[in-house]
Amino acid sequence: EIVLTQSPDLQSVTPGEKVTITCRASQSIDTRLHWYQQKPGQSPKLLIKYASQTFSGVPSRFSGSGSGTDFTLTINSLETEDAATYYCHQSSRFPFTFGPGTKVDLK
Amino acid sequence: QVQLQESGPRLVKPSETLSLTCTVSGLSINYYYWSWIRQRPGKGLEWIGYVYYTGSTEYNPSLKSRVSISVDTSKKQVSLKVTSVTAADTAVYYCARDHGNLADFWGQGTLVSVSS
């Protein structure tokens, strides 16, 4: 099973700041890495697919990069509505797996 | 409007079978995979498995012996069964459309508790 680790676990941010979340895979997954945003009481929403492709309707302040084992989700100029937990997810090999999540909250 | 709606009993007794249905509206059920994903209280996400509209399936080995996922294209429904449940199966269960091996549209989820 491919294990995904995320850092940091928690990031407290002031609106307008830049946020960077990293995801590392236990083995190479090419670019089969996706990012989701989940707010309390809601289902996850797809932000970035295949490491760097922004999903339809997602604001341009969200971007992703990486390949192989190391990936990054960047939120440029955080807005208050971006407070949420962010998960990475690999679909390179079965079973598909998720990272443990990074909680982004507001200072 | 794309909608995936999970339904089923919210309380299941230990050792019994958990059964959920996902009803799809606003998009075709054909030519897609349909996933079930769960989230234990306060925890992360766990992929349970998926079914293609033709009926072929893939399951997480950690649950494979207890899980069955099926599809009824005429009713536009996807079903999940988990047998011999324990408290560890208490979770929010989500169904999602899988397009290109990633879940792009999710239902709102349903909390299923396992308790006597």
Image: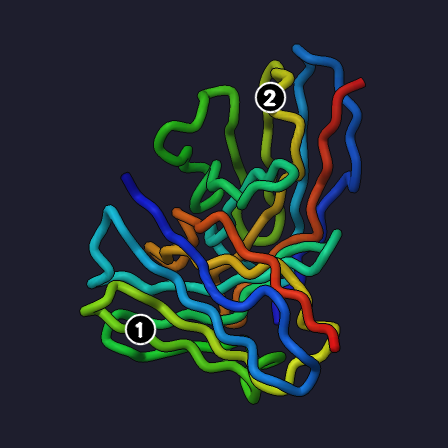
Q: CA distance from mark 2 to mark 1?
A: 36 Å
Query: Can you tell which mark lies on residue A81?
Result: 2
Q: Nearer the viewer, residue B42 or A5?
A: B42
- Mark 1 Cα shell of 10 Å, populated few (<14), some (14-19), many (≥20): many
- In this view, the residue in front, A32 or B100, is B100
Q: Residue at x 64, y 17 (%)?
A: A80
Q: Secondary structure at mark 2?
A: helix
Q: Looking at the image, which residue is at 66% across and 10% down?
A: A16
Rendered-image quadrant of the C terminus of chain B: bottom right
Disc 1 target residue: B71
**Image location (x, y in percent) of residue B37:** 53, 62
Amino acid type, residue under disc 2 in the picture: Glu
Between disc 2 and disc 1, the foreground one is 1
Image coordinates of residue B6 in percent, x first then y, are: 44, 58
> Residue A59 appears at what percent x and percent y?
45, 22
Which of the pair A94/A40 is nearer the observer? A40
Say what amino acid the circle numbered 1 marks. Val
User: Viewed as shown, does residue B5 lie left or right of A85?
Assistant: left
Q: In what element is the residue under mark 1?
A: strand
Numbered label attached to residue A1? none
Residue occupying the point 75% across, 52% down: B42
